[in-house]
Image: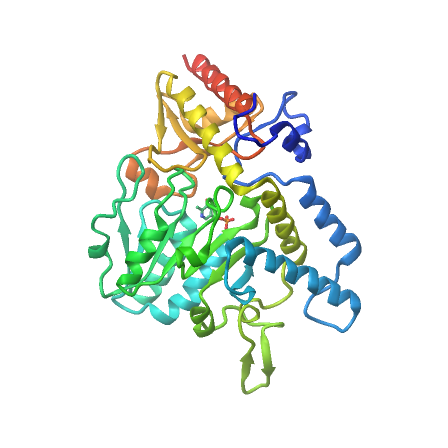
Amino acid sequence: MQTTTPLDIAKIREDFPILARPYKDRRLVYLDSAVSGLMPRAVNERIAYYQAFEHTNVHRGVSQLSQEATDRFEEAREKVRSFLNAPSNKQIIWTRGTTESINLVAQTYGRQHVHAGDEILLSAMEHHSNLVPWQLLAEERGAKLRVIPMNDAGELLLDNLEELITERTRILGVTQVSNVLGTINPVKEIIARAHAKGVPVLVDGAQAVPHMVVDVQDLDADFYVFSGHKLMGPTGIGVLYGKKEHLDAMPPWQGGGSMILSVSWEKTTFIGPPGKFEAGTPPIAQAIGLGAAIDYVRSLGLDLIAAHGHELLDYATARVRQIPGLRVIGEAKEKASVLSFVLEGVHPHDVGTILDYEGIVVRAGHHCAQPVMKRLNIPATTRASFACFNDRDDVDALVEGILKVKEIFG
Ligand code: PMP
Protein backbone atom coordinates (compact mmCIF):
# COMPACT_ATOMS: atom_id res chain seq x y z
CA MET A 1 0.00 0.00 0.00
CA GLN A 2 1.13 3.53 -0.79
CA THR A 3 1.89 6.16 1.81
CA THR A 4 0.11 9.51 1.54
CA THR A 5 3.18 11.27 0.15
CA PRO A 6 2.95 12.11 -3.55
CA LEU A 7 5.80 9.77 -4.53
CA ASP A 8 4.58 7.07 -6.91
CA ILE A 9 6.19 4.13 -5.14
CA ALA A 10 5.06 1.50 -7.66
CA LYS A 11 6.74 3.49 -10.41
CA ILE A 12 9.84 4.12 -8.30
CA ARG A 13 10.15 0.38 -7.63
CA GLU A 14 10.48 -0.18 -11.37
CA ASP A 15 13.65 1.92 -11.27
CA PHE A 16 15.33 -0.75 -9.11
CA PRO A 17 15.93 -3.95 -11.13
CA ILE A 18 17.08 -5.81 -8.01
CA LEU A 19 13.58 -5.54 -6.51
CA ALA A 20 12.25 -7.72 -9.32
CA ARG A 21 14.76 -10.55 -8.85
CA PRO A 22 13.62 -13.75 -7.19
CA TYR A 23 14.78 -13.91 -3.60
CA LYS A 24 14.03 -17.06 -1.61
CA ASP A 25 11.13 -17.54 -4.02
CA ARG A 26 9.50 -14.42 -2.66
CA ARG A 27 9.25 -10.70 -3.24
CA LEU A 28 12.49 -9.12 -2.05
CA VAL A 29 11.72 -6.85 0.88
CA TYR A 30 14.79 -4.66 1.20
CA LEU A 31 14.83 -2.89 4.54
CA ASP A 32 18.56 -2.35 4.71
CA SER A 33 19.22 0.93 2.94
CA ALA A 34 21.14 2.19 5.97
CA VAL A 35 23.77 -0.44 5.25
CA SER A 36 23.79 0.36 1.52
CA GLY A 37 21.26 1.96 -0.76
CA LEU A 38 20.03 -0.02 -3.76
CA MET A 39 21.14 1.40 -7.08
CA PRO A 40 18.53 2.68 -9.51
CA ARG A 41 18.82 1.64 -13.15
CA ALA A 42 19.80 5.19 -14.14
CA VAL A 43 22.97 4.93 -12.04
CA ASN A 44 23.89 1.50 -13.42
CA GLU A 45 23.29 2.71 -16.95
CA ARG A 46 25.34 5.86 -16.47
CA ILE A 47 28.29 3.86 -15.16
CA ALA A 48 27.98 1.28 -17.94
CA TYR A 49 27.84 4.04 -20.59
CA TYR A 50 30.92 5.70 -19.17
CA GLN A 51 32.81 2.40 -19.04
CA ALA A 52 31.77 1.48 -22.59
CA PHE A 53 32.15 4.77 -24.42
CA GLU A 54 33.90 7.47 -22.41
CA HIS A 55 36.52 5.82 -20.27
CA THR A 56 40.15 6.74 -20.03
CA ASN A 57 42.22 8.37 -17.29
CA VAL A 58 41.43 11.92 -16.17
CA HIS A 59 43.55 15.05 -15.71
CA ARG A 60 46.16 13.57 -18.03
CA GLY A 61 46.82 13.60 -21.70
CA VAL A 62 45.86 15.92 -24.47
CA SER A 63 43.39 13.63 -26.21
CA GLN A 64 39.78 14.60 -26.66
CA LEU A 65 38.88 11.31 -24.97
CA SER A 66 40.83 12.25 -21.87
CA GLN A 67 39.31 15.71 -21.88
CA GLU A 68 35.80 14.27 -22.13
CA ALA A 69 36.41 11.83 -19.25
CA THR A 70 37.83 14.71 -17.20
CA ASP A 71 34.79 16.86 -17.98
CA ARG A 72 32.35 14.09 -16.91
CA PHE A 73 34.38 13.50 -13.73
CA GLU A 74 34.46 17.19 -12.85
CA GLU A 75 30.75 17.58 -13.65
CA ALA A 76 30.10 14.91 -11.02
CA ARG A 77 32.12 16.96 -8.53
CA GLU A 78 29.98 19.96 -9.38
CA LYS A 79 26.85 17.90 -8.70
CA VAL A 80 28.17 17.09 -5.24
CA ARG A 81 29.04 20.74 -4.65
CA SER A 82 25.54 21.79 -5.55
CA PHE A 83 24.02 18.91 -3.51
CA LEU A 84 25.84 20.12 -0.37
CA ASN A 85 25.63 23.79 -1.33
CA ALA A 86 29.39 24.09 -0.90
CA PRO A 87 30.88 27.44 -2.00
CA SER A 88 33.34 25.92 -4.47
CA ASN A 89 34.02 22.56 -6.11
CA LYS A 90 37.63 22.97 -4.98
CA GLN A 91 36.23 22.10 -1.55
CA ILE A 92 34.85 18.72 -2.69
CA ILE A 93 37.42 15.95 -2.36
CA TRP A 94 36.81 12.45 -3.68
CA THR A 95 37.62 9.62 -1.30
CA ARG A 96 36.65 5.95 -1.07
CA GLY A 97 33.90 6.70 1.44
CA THR A 98 33.02 8.21 4.80
CA THR A 99 35.66 6.13 6.55
CA GLU A 100 38.44 7.29 4.28
CA SER A 101 37.28 10.91 4.49
CA ILE A 102 37.50 10.85 8.29
CA ASN A 103 40.89 9.13 8.24
CA LEU A 104 42.10 11.81 5.83
CA VAL A 105 41.04 14.58 8.21
CA ALA A 106 42.44 12.80 11.27
CA GLN A 107 45.80 12.23 9.63
CA THR A 108 46.22 15.67 8.10
CA TYR A 109 44.27 18.30 10.04
CA GLY A 110 44.41 16.08 13.13
CA ARG A 111 48.17 15.57 13.05
CA GLN A 112 48.67 19.29 12.52
CA HIS A 113 46.51 20.36 15.43
CA VAL A 114 46.33 17.56 18.01
CA HIS A 115 49.25 17.28 20.41
CA ALA A 116 50.01 15.71 23.78
CA GLY A 117 47.37 16.58 26.35
CA ASP A 118 44.85 17.82 23.76
CA GLU A 119 41.31 16.53 23.53
CA ILE A 120 39.06 15.27 20.74
CA LEU A 121 35.36 15.47 21.53
CA LEU A 122 33.00 12.89 19.97
CA SER A 123 29.37 12.02 20.54
CA ALA A 124 28.33 8.83 22.31
CA MET A 125 26.59 7.56 19.18
CA GLU A 126 29.43 7.61 16.66
CA HIS A 127 29.97 4.85 14.12
CA HIS A 128 33.38 3.21 14.56
CA SER A 129 34.56 5.13 11.53
CA ASN A 130 34.17 8.41 13.40
CA LEU A 131 35.82 7.00 16.50
CA VAL A 132 38.70 4.66 15.63
CA PRO A 133 40.59 7.13 13.38
CA TRP A 134 40.50 9.65 16.24
CA GLN A 135 41.53 7.02 18.76
CA LEU A 136 44.52 6.09 16.59
CA LEU A 137 45.46 9.76 16.40
CA ALA A 138 44.97 10.26 20.15
CA GLU A 139 47.22 7.29 20.90
CA GLU A 140 49.88 8.53 18.51
CA ARG A 141 49.78 12.03 20.00
CA GLY A 142 49.14 11.33 23.68
CA ALA A 143 45.78 13.08 23.37
CA LYS A 144 42.47 12.09 24.94
CA LEU A 145 39.03 11.26 23.59
CA ARG A 146 36.09 12.82 25.43
CA VAL A 147 32.45 11.92 24.90
CA ILE A 148 29.20 13.87 24.68
CA PRO A 149 26.82 11.53 26.55
CA MET A 150 23.33 10.47 25.51
CA ASN A 151 20.14 9.48 27.32
CA ASP A 152 18.32 6.13 27.15
CA ALA A 153 16.13 7.40 24.32
CA GLY A 154 19.24 7.97 22.22
CA GLU A 155 19.37 11.78 22.38
CA LEU A 156 22.60 13.66 23.00
CA LEU A 157 22.76 15.43 26.36
CA LEU A 158 23.89 18.87 25.33
CA ASP A 159 23.22 20.90 28.48
CA ASN A 160 26.86 20.66 29.54
CA LEU A 161 28.40 20.90 26.09
CA GLU A 162 30.31 24.08 26.97
CA GLU A 163 31.96 22.26 29.88
CA LEU A 164 32.97 19.35 27.65
CA ILE A 165 34.57 21.76 25.21
CA THR A 166 37.71 22.81 27.05
CA GLU A 167 40.67 24.93 26.00
CA ARG A 168 42.35 21.63 25.04
CA THR A 169 39.61 20.54 22.61
CA ARG A 170 41.01 20.56 19.09
CA ILE A 171 38.08 19.11 17.12
CA LEU A 172 34.53 17.88 17.68
CA GLY A 173 33.14 14.97 15.63
CA VAL A 174 29.43 14.22 15.48
CA THR A 175 27.10 12.21 13.31
CA GLN A 176 24.12 14.05 11.84
CA VAL A 177 21.98 10.89 11.93
CA SER A 178 22.76 7.82 14.05
CA ASN A 179 22.95 4.61 12.03
CA VAL A 180 21.73 2.58 15.02
CA LEU A 181 19.13 4.81 16.67
CA GLY A 182 17.97 6.96 13.78
CA THR A 183 18.44 10.05 15.97
CA ILE A 184 18.78 13.31 14.04
CA ASN A 185 21.27 15.38 16.00
CA PRO A 186 20.98 19.19 16.12
CA VAL A 187 24.30 19.63 14.35
CA LYS A 188 23.75 23.25 13.43
CA GLU A 189 23.36 24.14 17.09
CA ILE A 190 26.31 21.95 18.12
CA ILE A 191 28.50 23.60 15.49
CA ALA A 192 27.49 27.11 16.61
CA ARG A 193 28.25 26.28 20.25
CA ALA A 194 31.60 24.65 19.34
CA HIS A 195 32.55 27.64 17.18
CA ALA A 196 31.71 30.00 20.03
CA LYS A 197 34.56 28.25 21.86
CA GLY A 198 36.82 28.23 18.80
CA VAL A 199 36.51 24.50 18.05
CA PRO A 200 35.97 23.15 14.51
CA VAL A 201 33.42 20.42 13.82
CA LEU A 202 33.44 17.39 11.53
CA VAL A 203 29.96 16.13 10.67
CA ASP A 204 29.48 12.50 9.64
CA GLY A 205 26.70 12.75 7.06
CA ALA A 206 26.70 9.07 5.99
CA GLN A 207 23.14 8.47 7.21
CA ALA A 208 21.90 12.02 6.73
CA VAL A 209 22.36 12.62 3.01
CA PRO A 210 19.78 9.99 1.95
CA HIS A 211 17.13 11.58 4.17
CA MET A 212 17.47 15.34 4.21
CA VAL A 213 18.63 18.41 2.35
CA VAL A 214 22.12 19.30 3.57
CA ASP A 215 23.56 22.77 3.31
CA VAL A 216 27.13 22.87 4.59
CA GLN A 217 27.19 26.68 4.56
CA ASP A 218 24.01 26.95 6.57
CA LEU A 219 25.36 24.35 9.02
CA ASP A 220 28.71 26.17 9.01
CA ALA A 221 30.38 22.71 9.15
CA ASP A 222 34.17 22.69 9.01
CA PHE A 223 34.19 19.22 7.48
CA TYR A 224 31.28 17.18 6.13
CA VAL A 225 31.70 13.58 4.94
CA PHE A 226 29.53 10.94 3.30
CA SER A 227 29.61 7.76 1.19
CA GLY A 228 28.20 7.32 -2.30
CA HIS A 229 26.69 3.90 -1.65
CA LYS A 230 24.36 5.15 1.10
CA LEU A 231 22.90 7.58 -1.43
CA MET A 232 22.09 4.91 -4.03
CA GLY A 233 25.42 5.45 -5.74
CA PRO A 234 28.20 2.90 -6.15
CA THR A 235 30.63 1.68 -3.53
CA GLY A 236 34.23 2.89 -3.61
CA ILE A 237 33.38 6.58 -3.72
CA GLY A 238 32.90 9.11 -0.96
CA VAL A 239 33.17 12.79 -0.31
CA LEU A 240 35.05 15.09 1.99
CA TYR A 241 33.87 18.69 2.10
CA GLY A 242 36.08 21.10 3.98
CA LYS A 243 36.22 24.82 4.62
CA LYS A 244 38.71 26.52 2.32
CA GLU A 245 40.96 27.80 5.07
CA HIS A 246 41.34 24.28 6.53
CA LEU A 247 41.95 22.56 3.18
CA ASP A 248 44.49 25.19 2.14
CA ALA A 249 46.43 24.79 5.37
CA MET A 250 46.29 20.98 5.57
CA PRO A 251 49.28 18.95 4.33
CA PRO A 252 48.73 16.32 1.62
CA TRP A 253 47.67 12.91 2.86
CA GLN A 254 48.90 10.40 0.29
CA GLY A 255 51.64 11.23 -2.19
CA GLY A 256 51.76 10.27 -5.84
CA GLY A 257 50.73 11.37 -9.29
CA SER A 258 48.19 14.10 -10.02
CA MET A 259 48.75 16.01 -6.79
CA ILE A 260 52.07 17.72 -7.52
CA LEU A 261 53.20 21.03 -8.94
CA SER A 262 56.84 19.99 -9.34
CA VAL A 263 58.97 17.06 -8.24
CA SER A 264 62.71 16.79 -7.87
CA TRP A 265 64.87 14.50 -5.74
CA GLU A 266 65.29 17.39 -3.35
CA LYS A 267 61.74 18.65 -2.98
CA THR A 268 58.17 18.25 -4.17
CA THR A 269 55.58 21.00 -4.25
CA PHE A 270 51.86 20.38 -4.41
CA ILE A 271 48.82 21.74 -6.20
CA GLY A 272 45.96 23.15 -4.15
CA PRO A 273 42.76 21.39 -3.09
CA PRO A 274 41.11 19.20 -4.20
CA GLY A 275 44.01 17.74 -6.22
CA LYS A 276 46.39 17.94 -3.25
CA PHE A 277 44.30 15.22 -1.56
CA GLU A 278 43.66 13.06 -4.62
CA ALA A 279 46.90 11.22 -5.35
CA GLY A 280 46.80 8.64 -8.11
CA THR A 281 44.06 7.61 -10.51
CA PRO A 282 40.74 8.40 -8.86
CA PRO A 283 37.56 6.26 -8.90
CA ILE A 284 36.24 7.88 -12.10
CA ALA A 285 33.26 5.67 -12.96
CA GLN A 286 32.20 5.69 -9.32
CA ALA A 287 32.29 9.49 -9.14
CA ILE A 288 30.19 9.73 -12.29
CA GLY A 289 27.83 7.13 -10.82
CA LEU A 290 27.47 9.18 -7.65
CA GLY A 291 26.64 12.20 -9.80
CA ALA A 292 23.88 10.14 -11.44
CA ALA A 293 22.59 9.06 -8.01
CA ILE A 294 22.39 12.70 -6.96
CA ASP A 295 20.42 13.45 -10.13
CA TYR A 296 18.10 10.58 -9.28
CA VAL A 297 17.31 11.57 -5.68
CA ARG A 298 16.92 15.19 -6.73
CA SER A 299 14.50 14.19 -9.48
CA LEU A 300 12.31 12.56 -6.82
CA GLY A 301 12.87 15.41 -4.37
CA LEU A 302 14.70 14.95 -1.09
CA ASP A 303 11.85 16.62 0.80
CA LEU A 304 9.40 14.06 -0.55
CA ILE A 305 11.80 11.19 0.15
CA ALA A 306 12.15 12.47 3.72
CA ALA A 307 8.38 12.81 4.19
CA HIS A 308 7.82 9.31 2.82
CA GLY A 309 10.52 7.91 5.10
CA HIS A 310 8.98 9.59 8.15
CA GLU A 311 5.57 8.26 7.35
CA LEU A 312 6.89 4.71 6.96
CA LEU A 313 8.88 5.06 10.17
CA ASP A 314 5.79 6.20 12.09
CA TYR A 315 3.70 3.40 10.62
CA ALA A 316 6.36 0.76 11.31
CA THR A 317 7.04 2.03 14.84
CA ALA A 318 3.33 1.95 15.73
CA ARG A 319 2.96 -1.57 14.30
CA VAL A 320 6.02 -3.16 15.91
CA ARG A 321 5.22 -1.57 19.28
CA GLN A 322 2.14 -3.79 19.40
CA ILE A 323 4.30 -6.92 19.30
CA PRO A 324 4.69 -8.29 22.85
CA GLY A 325 8.32 -8.61 23.95
CA LEU A 326 9.59 -6.19 21.31
CA ARG A 327 11.45 -3.09 22.43
CA VAL A 328 12.25 -0.22 20.07
CA ILE A 329 15.85 0.97 20.51
CA GLY A 330 16.15 4.67 19.80
CA GLU A 331 13.17 6.79 20.76
CA ALA A 332 14.50 10.26 20.02
CA LYS A 333 11.96 12.94 19.18
CA GLU A 334 13.77 13.68 15.91
CA LYS A 335 14.40 10.52 13.93
CA ALA A 336 15.22 9.53 10.37
CA SER A 337 13.81 6.32 8.90
CA VAL A 338 15.87 3.83 10.89
CA LEU A 339 14.10 1.42 13.23
CA SER A 340 16.18 -0.69 15.62
CA PHE A 341 14.62 -3.16 18.00
CA VAL A 342 15.31 -6.10 20.28
CA LEU A 343 13.03 -9.05 20.79
CA GLU A 344 12.91 -10.63 24.22
CA GLY A 345 14.62 -14.02 24.36
CA VAL A 346 15.85 -14.00 20.74
CA HIS A 347 19.28 -12.90 19.58
CA PRO A 348 19.11 -10.24 16.82
CA HIS A 349 21.17 -12.50 14.55
CA ASP A 350 18.45 -15.15 14.78
CA VAL A 351 15.79 -12.51 14.09
CA GLY A 352 17.73 -11.35 11.02
CA THR A 353 18.32 -14.91 9.77
CA ILE A 354 14.67 -15.92 10.06
CA LEU A 355 13.50 -12.69 8.43
CA ASP A 356 15.91 -13.43 5.59
CA TYR A 357 14.24 -16.83 5.05
CA GLU A 358 11.09 -14.80 4.53
CA GLY A 359 12.78 -12.61 1.92
CA ILE A 360 13.17 -9.66 4.28
CA VAL A 361 16.65 -8.15 4.36
CA VAL A 362 17.51 -6.26 7.55
CA ARG A 363 20.74 -5.70 9.45
CA ALA A 364 21.46 -7.45 12.72
CA GLY A 365 24.45 -6.82 14.92
CA HIS A 366 26.25 -4.02 16.71
CA HIS A 367 26.15 -1.85 13.56
CA CYS A 368 29.80 -0.80 13.97
CA ALA A 369 28.79 1.11 17.08
CA GLN A 370 29.87 -1.06 20.00
CA PRO A 371 29.99 1.87 22.47
CA VAL A 372 26.29 2.52 21.70
CA MET A 373 25.47 -1.12 22.49
CA LYS A 374 27.45 -0.90 25.72
CA ARG A 375 25.75 2.34 26.72
CA LEU A 376 22.31 0.77 26.20
CA ASN A 377 23.37 -2.51 27.74
CA ILE A 378 22.39 -4.67 24.79
CA PRO A 379 24.61 -6.93 22.67
CA ALA A 380 23.06 -6.02 19.34
CA THR A 381 19.86 -4.94 17.62
CA THR A 382 17.88 -5.84 14.53
CA ARG A 383 17.55 -2.79 12.30
CA ALA A 384 15.10 -2.02 9.52
CA SER A 385 15.71 1.07 7.43
CA PHE A 386 13.44 2.60 4.82
CA ALA A 387 14.01 4.24 1.45
CA CYS A 388 11.97 5.77 -1.36
CA PHE A 389 11.07 2.36 -2.86
CA ASN A 390 9.66 0.87 0.36
CA ASP A 391 5.96 0.86 1.04
CA ARG A 392 3.57 -0.20 3.76
CA ASP A 393 3.50 -3.74 2.34
CA ASP A 394 7.19 -3.98 3.21
CA VAL A 395 6.45 -2.91 6.78
CA ASP A 396 3.57 -5.39 7.01
CA ALA A 397 5.90 -8.14 5.75
CA LEU A 398 8.39 -7.15 8.47
CA VAL A 399 5.72 -7.37 11.16
CA GLU A 400 4.53 -10.77 9.94
CA GLY A 401 8.14 -11.93 9.81
CA ILE A 402 8.75 -10.86 13.39
CA LEU A 403 5.58 -12.68 14.47
CA LYS A 404 6.94 -15.80 12.76
CA VAL A 405 10.22 -15.41 14.67
CA LYS A 406 8.23 -15.27 17.89
CA GLU A 407 6.30 -18.39 16.91
CA ILE A 408 9.52 -20.32 16.21
CA PHE A 409 11.09 -19.23 19.50
CA GLY A 410 7.90 -19.93 21.42
N1 PMP B 1 29.15 6.69 9.60
C1 PMP B 1 27.91 6.23 9.67
C2 PMP B 1 26.89 6.96 10.50
C3 PMP B 1 27.55 5.09 8.96
O1 PMP B 1 26.30 4.61 9.03
C4 PMP B 1 28.52 4.42 8.18
C5 PMP B 1 28.20 3.17 7.40
N2 PMP B 1 27.51 2.22 8.13
C6 PMP B 1 29.80 4.96 8.13
C7 PMP B 1 30.08 6.09 8.86
C8 PMP B 1 30.90 4.32 7.34
O2 PMP B 1 30.65 4.41 5.97
P1 PMP B 1 31.58 3.67 4.91
O3 PMP B 1 31.68 2.24 5.38
O4 PMP B 1 30.84 3.80 3.64
O5 PMP B 1 32.88 4.35 4.92
Residue 331: % across, % down: 33, 32
Which one is in front, 389 or 123?
A: 389
Give the quadrant of residue 109: bottom left
Q: Is residue 234 visible?
A: no
Point out the image quarter for the C terminus: top left
Is 113 above or below relative to 209?
below
Which one is in front, 136 or 8?
A: 8
Question: In the image, 359: left or right of 345?
Answer: right
Which residue lies at the image location 67% right of the left edge and 45% below the top edge? 43
Residue 309: % across, % down: 49, 33
Give the quadrant of residue 255: bottom right
Residue 127: % across, % down: 41, 47
Question: In the image, 299: left or right of 240?
Answer: right
Give the quadrant of residue 77: bottom right
Point out the image quarter for the N terminus: top right
Residue 371: % across, % down: 33, 43
